[in-house]
Image (spheres, rainbow, N blue to C red):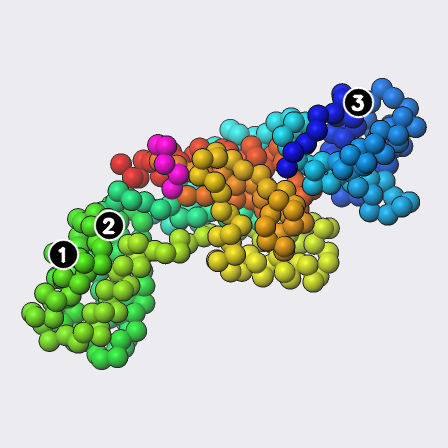
Amino acid sequence: MMVKNLDERKKNILHAIIQEHIVTASPVGSRTLAKKYDLGVSSATIRNEMADLEELGYLKQPHTSAGRIPSDKGYRYYVDILMKNKGVNSDKLIKTLSEIAKDRHGINSIVSSMTTMLSEFTKYATMITEPEFKNIKISEVQLMKVTHNKLLLVMVTDNGFVSDKLIGIEEELNKRKIRYINNFLVNKIEGKNITKLDKEFFEEIEQELIKKINLSHHIFTIINKEIKELVNPEDVKIYIGGTSYILDQPEFNDIDYLKKVLNVLDHEDTLKQIIRAEKNKELEVRIGHENEMEEMQRCSVVIANYSIGDEAVGKIGVLGPTRMEYPRVISTVNIVSDILSKIISEVNK
């Protein structure tokens, strides 16, 4: 969104209005600004400047008798030009996140805990995707019998990522067959780079196994499919936290709109649309109507990548109303991105 540069007086007034509205969630009038902010001009002058800012599209008036509130354009100008980085207590945040990394085992657990902690620090809904790795190996694979028609497939990668999948089967496998299949999978898959586990590889080992053991093609087709999904998932898991914080924001008092937002957050396909970020951007802020999804056009989303070296492997997102505390959220997201990048880089060595 293109924004026109403003003179210093208009900048100061717009900054004050946004600061006041973030705190109060109410329209802001000229008298309030004159009393609470040292703007160096009269209430009448502030009122005239506010009218100009509204005409330029930076403010809007929800009711004729009310004060003004920032528009999406006003928030964009604030984020790009006016915002001062108040930041957060970075020492406390870094210490807390570092302790999470020490106390949790496996990437899944670390990412899940980071999502929860990010929501606690920002007081908004948060999302973090599991990392998408390319240069990793399968360190362990095991098939276990759960019931007569269900098997549990567990895979562990050399960087600590754990996946498990419950598989339904039509015929019962005895212990001898399961043991044989396990040994076969260990010999064929453990230590293999996931980039080598392609369709041709699985078709080849399928034929080899069927020749060695009286195993129905249907069973191995299921196992084959689940292994491929585990090592090369089409849908990366997204951890979400802090959805209850949405209820604290007056912008979501409209029950119908609240239901729409919660419905979006309840589905991974829509979450993926929200958290989508351009890979060449370290941090992206989408405000109001900059969000493509209609349900999100009263919201703002702050998104950052976390990386291994120069390669982005996952995404971090914070979602709240357009009246978001941008300095605190952006600062927190940047810190979490840096720490998670370091943790993921260490476990991926």
Give the residue at x 79% y 22%: 9
Instruction: Give coordinates of residue 283: x percent, y percent.
Output: 51, 35
Amino acid type of the residue that numbered disc 3 sits on in the rendered structure: Arg
Relative depth, front residue between 105 and 233: 233
Q: Which residue is mark 2?
A: 194
Under circle 1, the secondary element is helix
**Residue at position x 36%, y 36% from top?**
311
Q: Position of residue 303 (x, y in %)?
A: 52, 41
Residue 278 lies, in percent from the top left, at 47, 40
Q: Residue at x 22, y 75 (%)?
A: 218
Q: Mark 2 belongs to which amino acid?
A: Ile
Q: Amino acid at mark 1?
A: Lys
Alpha carbon separation for disc pair 3 and 1: 70 Å
Does the stretch in magenta take in 342? Answer: no
- Count neighbours of disc 3 (C-alpha within 10 A) and say few if under 14, some if 14 to 19, many if 20 or more: some
Q: Which numbered dot is residue 9? A: 3
